[in-house]
Image (cartoon, helix red, strand yellow):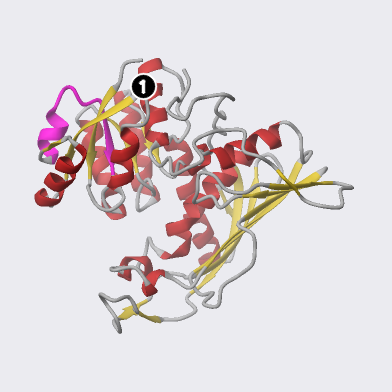
Amino acid sequence: MDKLKVGIIGTGNISGIYFQNGKRFESMEIVACADLNAELAAAKAAEYGVRACTVEDLLADPDIGMVINLTVPKVHAAVSIQALEAGKHVYSEKPLAATREEGKRVLEVAQSRGLLVGCAPDTFLGGGLQTCIKLIEDGWIGTPIGATAFMLGGGPEGWHPNPDFFYQPGGGPLFDMGPYYLTALVAMLGPIKQVTGMAQISFPERIATSKELFGKKIKVETPTHIASTLKFSSGPIATLLTSFDVKAGSTLPRIELYGSEGTLEVPDPNTFGGKILIRRAGAQEWSDIPLTYGKAENARGVGAADMATAILTGRAHRANGEMAYHVLEAMFGILDSSEQGVHYTMESTCQRPEPFPLGLADHSLGE
C-alpha cells in the first residue's frame, strides 16, 4: 500500500505519540510539522526526522494529503477549516470543536469539498474495546439493556502545570474526559437519541498544588460534577457520571454493560488495552476474557492511520467527524438539560463504526 503524506499542526506534548506511531502504521508517513512556536516545531522536527515549516507552507505543500490537528481545543475548528479550505483531509484531536455551530461548520466545509474529517478519541479502536464490541456482537451478554460509566477524580490542579483551562467553559470533566466514555458507548451501542443531565460547580475556587503553580487560586467557571442519563436509539439506557470533585477517590468501575444474558465490565476507555470481565446469567463467578485484537498498547493515532487507509482505498473510516460531532452535541445537550430542566433530544445521529476484522497485524488497518 502507498503511504499518504501527512503534516502535523500543533507540536505540544501530545504530538510525540503521534510522531512515534506515525512510523508504526503502514498507511501514512508524517513528513512535516508546524506550530505558532517555531522553536518548538523545529525541535520536534529534529527529534522525529521531519521538516519544520510554517502553517502556511505546510498547507500549500501539494504532496501533503492530510493534516493532523493537535492545536489547543478552542482553535480546533478554525485550524481544521483552514486545512480543509486548502484541500487537505483533516484528523483532529478531541473535541471536534468548541461549540456545536463550529462543529457543524467543519463538517459542512468538508462535505462541500469532498474531503474527510476524523477526530479523536480513537481508543475504541484498541484491543480492549474492539474485543468488547466483538463480545456484544456475538451475543455474550444477550440484548444490551443498559450501561453505567464513571469518571471520578479530584481534578488536575494537583499535577497539571497549567490547569486553568480545565475550569473554563469548554473544560470540566465532561468535555475533558467525557469524549472517551461517550465515544466508547456509541461504538458499542450506536447513536444516542436523548440525554438528561444535572450539573453543578461544587467548589467555586480551586487551589493549584503543582510545583509550577503552588498556591495559585483558580476560579471555576464550568460545571465540575455532572450526572447524566443517555437513551440510545437501539434501546439501552445508560448513566454517565463525570466529576473533578471526588477528592478521596472511588472504587466504581469505568464502564459496565448490562444485557439480557450477562454483564460486561469494559476497560478504561482512555486506554487501548485493559482487563475485560464477563459474567453470564447463572454463572457464580466473573471470567477474564483475553483480548482478541491487537493495538492494545498506546496506539494513539490509529484513528488517523485508519483514515489515511480510507483515503487511499475509498472505504469508510472509523473515528469519523460525524461520530465526533454526535458526541459533541450530546455533551452540550447534557448541560442544556441541566440549565433548562428538560430532556434534550439529539438532532444528529451517526453510524456505529465497523469493528476491525480479526487477525490484523498491529501495524495494519485492513483494506
Instruction: State the residue at coordinates (44%, 34%).
Output: 320
Q: Residues within 10 Å of mark 1 (few under 14, many from 20)?
A: some
Q: Is residue 199 inside the magenta stretch?
A: no
Q: In front: 232, or 173? A: 173
* Amino acid type shown at disc 1: Ile
Q: Is residue 172 above or below residue 308?
A: below
Instruction: State the residue at coordinates (76%, 34%).
Output: 139
- Residue 77 position by quadrant: top left
Residue 185, percent across and down?
59, 46
Horizontal side of 359 relative to 116 (left or right) equals: right
The answer to whether residue 210 is seen in the rendering is yes
Q: In front: 21, or 253? A: 21
- Residue 342 position by quadrant: bottom right
Query: Of helix, strand and loop, which one carries label 1?
Result: helix
Instruction: State the residue at coordinates (38%, 48%).
Output: 94
Q: Is residue 58 inside the magenta stretch?
A: yes
Tell how many labels: 1
Q: Which residues, given as a range, are shown in magenta?
A: 55-69
Furthest-bottom residue in this view: 215
Horizontal side of 138 relative to 30 (left or right) equals: right
The answer to whether residue 221 is seen in the rendering is no
> Where is mark 1, residue-wise?
311
Instruction: State the residue at coordinates (38%, 38%).
Output: 301
Horizontal side of 136 relative to 344 (left or right) equals: right
